[in-house]
Image (tube, helix red, strand yellow):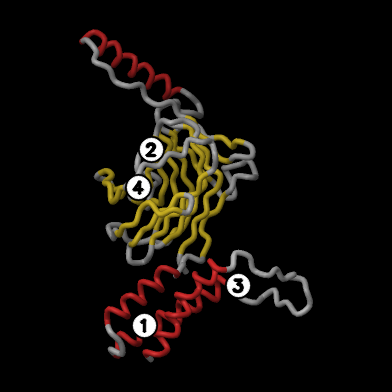
Amino acid sequence: MRAAILILACLALAQPAAAQEQRYAPWTDPNAPGTDPNAPGTDERLQEFIGRLKGLIDEAESSRAANPRFLRDLRDLATGFDRPWRKSVLFDDFRDGDYTANPAWTVTGGRFAISRDWGLRSTVQAAPARRNLTGEQAALAFLGQILDQSLRKKEAAGDTGAEAAIHAAAAITNAFSIQLELSSWMPDGRFEFGPYQGAADGAGYSLSYRPGQPLELLSVSARGARVIDRGSSPVTLEDKRLHSFEWTRRTDGRMTVSVDGAEVLSTQDRGIGGAFDGFRLVNRGGDFIVRSVSIKGTE
């Protein structure tokens, strides 16, 4: 048993090294004679390997066939390669020019539009900075806010306030993988996205981006939002280019967030159990374009 585990572990450790040594692999014509189009791909074989390795580790732990610390290291290694999110639950690249179908997104605040060749765009004017006002100035400002709110309630389709929100219903498992492409066009505001339970403004998780600030991972509930973790370095994306976010959550509550392939957050939270009912995007005072959204869950 111990020998089998060692062999599998060595194979797992050797794989990344081999990938680094050889940048390009020989190309094979998929239509060439003798090529099986249904043969399992590299990802499928790797997942099969990880499954077998985990099974051996479980067996070794139950029979105490190896040092517990060694088995724990092996399990951490296997978990690092494991990608259990195989079921696609939501995907949209907005190429069809319509966000109201396939899948259907629902706007709950502000305005959204499809920007050709870019994606789903929302622009929200940031709230003006507060100043020290005299009593009369403060009263006039308050009256202006009341009038502005009254006018906005009468507008037919759009809210010109400091927030734009949109969501799509989706059966997202508690463990998930979210990939989102985003471009930011103003050094203002804040952009948040994440899965929710129940109504679109219900409990869930949210990843918050503010230009020039570290990313924040939030837990949202009826009592408000709390910061679960915050990145150690500021993130700035205002170059009008697409940037890729990858956010994964495992069955044990461990979450990892990467931006353009570089990990910026890694934490664990089990505060929210059960599946999620949808995915929301919120723009608070910025100009953001979402190029694509891809969410996968576990089987």
Q: Which residue is mark 1?
A: 57
- Which of the two discs, 2 and 1, labels the residue nearer the N terminus? 1
Q: Which residue is mark 2?
A: 210
- Which of the two discs, 2 and 4, labels the residue nearer the N terminus? 4
Q: Is residue 225 left or right of residue 124?
A: left
Q: Which residue is mark 3?
A: 41
x, y (%) of residue 17? 50, 70
Q: Which residue is mark 4?
A: 202
State the SS at label 4: loop
- Which of the two discs, 1 and 4, labels the residue nearer the N terminus? 1
x, y (%) of residue 102? 59, 50
- The Cα–Cα distance between marks 3 and 4, rounded to whole angstroms, is 39 Å
Identify whether 72 is placed above or below 253.
below
Identify whether 62 is placed above or below 17.
below
**Mark 2 is on which residue type?**
Arg
- The Cα–Cα distance between marks 2 and 1, rounded to whole angstroms, is 42 Å
